[in-house]
Amino acid sequence: MTDLLTRRLLLVHAHPDDESINNGATMARYAAEGARVTLVTCTLGEEGEVIPPGLAHLAPDRDDTLGPHRVDELAAAMKKLGVTDHRFLGGPGRYRDSGMMGVEQNERPGAFWSADVDEAAAHLVEVIREVRPQVLVTYDPNGGYGHPDHIQAHRVAMRAADLSPDPDHRPDLGEPWEIAKVYWNRVPRGVLLEGFGRLRRDLAEPGRLPFERAASVTDVPGVVDDHIVTTEIDGTDFAAAKAAAMRAHATQIEVAEPYFVLSNRLAQPLLTTEYYELVRGRREGGSRESDLFEGIPGDSFDERQTFGEQQNGTAL
């Protein structure tokens, strides 16, 4: 097993809030165990819908200041999870939220969806070669649910994982580094159906929840048949941290544990065991892993100094 002081986990997400919904418990657990957890967010989420009426003026069709506000929300969420290394791909505002698939925002100058994949991947290669993660977590090829920025985040993450170990590729970006294991975010259908069953029973009790309607399984990104899932991370002890991080994204999420809603006001379960599919790297045995770092031997990289500097510095 990899020594805790050398464990390094990199997560690549499209917008602020994606990380807390998909991986909040995982991030909090590994951060609490002393691993270095690095989050790279690809856009500021400028095109998101705003839930609180008092913040409606932030929306892109009004003041268009939602992006900077969500930067602050992300910083607050990371504090709740105990994660101190969070960055934006290419720097804050380098790539803009592309909106939903098929809208004119997809092709706007600076939109992440229209970015050159290799150019965007170069920013991530630099992070990979600096941080030297053994594990990368991102989306599947459909981005979980077809959002253009999620699809592009998948493309950029996988391309960077391919390019980073190549000594001939951009030596100016640092020493080559090969990521040992790559995971995609998943949700097993069976677990979700059980969660929705509990949700519907709770909705049937008057006054039990502040929500009126449940979402459906098809509204949840990354749902797959149970056998596709290779790994489950028990984040039960970090349920409160995950819920607090999600609450920090107040423009996008409303939480009433153990459920939450997005701007569509359709309730869904808040999962504190989080699920993954291993798509690159070695898996030991046929049962589900309970550790993203399972099977990775310790390496010679001196993490102590780097992690200490990161803890005492500011996120890039």
Image (cartoon, helix red, strand yellow):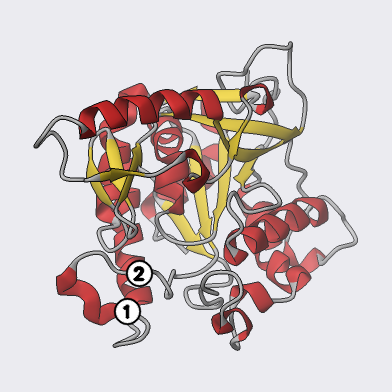
Q: Is residue 238 left or right of residue 14?
A: left
| Secondary structure beneath label 1 | loop
Q: Position of residue 276 (x, y in %)?
A: 60, 32
Residue topped by disc 1: 59
Kindly identify the amino acid type of the residue bearing the numbered disc 2: Glu
* Mark 2 and mark 1 residues within 8 Å of each other at the beta carbon: yes
Q: Is residue 130 left or right of residue 238?
A: right
- Vertical side of 251 occupied by 110: above or below: below
Displayed quadrant of residue 154: bottom right
**Residue 3 visible here:** no
Kindly identify the amino acid type of the residue bearing the numbered disc 1: Ala
Determine crowd level at label 1: few under 14, some 14-19, many 20+ residues with C-alpha closer than 10 A.
Answer: some
Residue pictured at 36% horizontal, 67% vertical? 71
Determine crowd level at label 2: few under 14, some 14-19, many 20+ residues with C-alpha closer than 10 A.
Answer: some
| Secondary structure beneath label 2 | loop
- Looking at marks 2 and 1 on the same chain, the residue that comes earlier in the sequence is marked by 2
Q: Position of residue 190 (x, y in %)?
A: 52, 23
Q: In this orientation, which residue lies closer to the viewer: 123 or 218?
A: 218
- Vertical side of 78 occupied by 5: above or below: above
Q: Which mark is residue 173?
A: none
Residue topped by disc 2: 49
Q: Is residue 243 left or right of residue 271?
A: left
